[in-house]
Image (cartoon, rainbow, N blue to C red):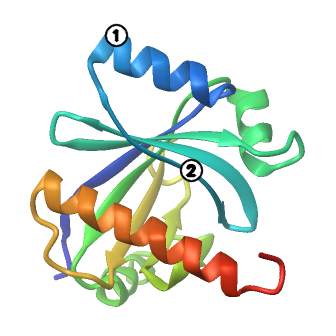
């Protein structure tokens, strides 16, 4: 049976990334790691990555008012957007879900660094779960996860330079 390995990160939808980073660092003592504009699920967003204890937090701000994340904030307000979970074998985990009749509304391979699926909030008490398998294995500590995050952001930066739009 494929199992969840660990919490990978928590994604929080925010209207103003600069203000959110300031509040999380000032109030909670979070450590700022990086900031990056990314495209996930066809939507551009600006993400601030923070370390809070042994957990990664992604503060997600929509890049444009018509993006999915902006619509999410309009409907629900700022707050919890998703919980990222890591698995060892995403295909096996997906097969288990499909055997249970669980709907998988989205599959993606962002930047070629991981495979991921999104689970519908309808199935899990109103919370979106992003379940992923990293291609680069072995990031077992928060320090290793941060180093992997930096490598992922660098790869996305290189991919942007190579793309015709970049």
Q: Quadrant of residue 148?
A: bottom left
Q: Residue at x 30, y 27 (%)?
A: 30
Q: Quadrant of residue 136?
A: bottom left
Q: Position of residue 22 (x, y in %)?
A: 47, 18
SS at circle 2: loop
Quadrant for the N terminus, please.
bottom left
Q: Judge whether residue 109 can be spotted in this image.
A: no
Q: Is residue 166 above or below residue 7?
A: below
Q: Is residue 141 above or below residue 90?
A: above
Any mark on residue 27, and which? Answer: 1
Any mark on residue 122, and which? Answer: 2
SS at circle 1: helix
Q: Residue at x 83, y 78 (%)?
A: 165
Q: Position of residue 116 (x, y in %)?
A: 46, 74
Any mark on residue 134, and which? Answer: none
Question: Do residues under tags 2 and 1 come within 8 Å of each other at their CB atoms?
Answer: no
Decide: few, some or many residues near mark 1? Use Cα within 10 Å; few <14, some 14-19, many ≥20: few
Q: Judge whether residue 35 can be spotted in this image.
A: yes
138 and 97: which one is in front? 138
Q: Is residue 145 left or right of residue 60?
A: left
């Amino acid at each position: 049976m494929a199992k969840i390995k660990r919490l990978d990160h928590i994604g929080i939808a925010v209207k103003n990334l600069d203000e959110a980073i300031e509040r999380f660092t000032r109030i909670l003592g979070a450590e700022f790691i990086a900031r990056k504009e990314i495209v996930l699920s066809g939507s551009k967003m600006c993400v601030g990555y923070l370390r809070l204890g042994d957990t990664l937090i992604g503060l997600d701000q929509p890049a444009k008012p018509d993006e999915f994340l902006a619509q999410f904030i309009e409907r629900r307000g700022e707050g919890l957007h998703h919980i990222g979970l890591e698995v060892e074998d995403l295909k096996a985990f997906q097969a288990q879900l499909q055997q249970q009749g669980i709907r998988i509304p989205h599959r993606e391979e962002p930047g070629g660094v991981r495979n991921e699926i999104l689970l519908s909030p309808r199935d899990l008490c109103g919370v979106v779960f992003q379940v992923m398998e990293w291609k680069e294995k072995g990031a077992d500590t928060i320090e290793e996860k941060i180093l992997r995050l930096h490598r992922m952001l660098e790869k996305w930066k290189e991919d942007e330079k190579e793309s015709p739009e970049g």
